[in-house]
Image (cartoon, grey):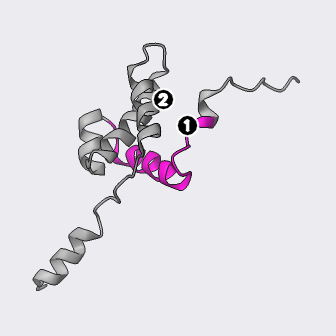
Amino acid sequence: MFIISRVDAFAMVRCCVAAPIDVTNKPRRRLEAIVRRHSAPQSLVMRARIILLGAAGAGVRETAEQLGLGRATVQRWRARWMATAGRPFQSRTGPTPPSPRR
């Protein structure tokens, strides 16, 4: 039989809490503009919503449930945002490179 103290229970819960996402004003405005733009690809809009929800304090599970996504998808885009200092969408918003000819 396992006995879990309050300290252990807190540590177990704490390990699963997502790191907060810091979004400054300029990137926030760009993300909000992507969400509002009707011609934006829906995959890009979904990524922007993931980051905006994370910046508002929503956790991974809450974000996934609200957007109808898997937790792994939310975790992946949160991690990319944090790893690239808020610029993970830059390379994905430009024109697609030409395919190699055979």
Q: Nearer the viewer, residue 85 or 58?
A: 85
| Residue stretch rendered in magenta on the structure | 69-90
Task: Describe residue 57's horizontal placement relative to residue 28 as left or right.
Answer: left
Circle 1 sits on which residue? 89
Task: Describe residue 34's horizontal placement relative to residue 94 as left or right.
Answer: left
Residue 1 lies, in percent from the top left, at: 11, 86
Circle 1 residues within 10 Å: few <14, some 14–19, many ≥20: some
Q: How many marks?
A: 2
Residue 37 lies, in percent from the top left, at: 43, 17
Q: What's the residue at 47%, 28% (across, down)?
A: 43
Type of amino acid at the residue the image marks with label 1: Phe
Residue sitting farthest toward the front: 25
The image shows residue 70, relative to residue 98, as above or below, that is below
Instruction: Provide the secondary structure element on which disc 2 rests.
Output: helix
Task: Describe residue 9's horizontal placement relative to residue 78 as left or right.
Answer: left
Type of amino acid at the residue the image marks with label 2: Leu
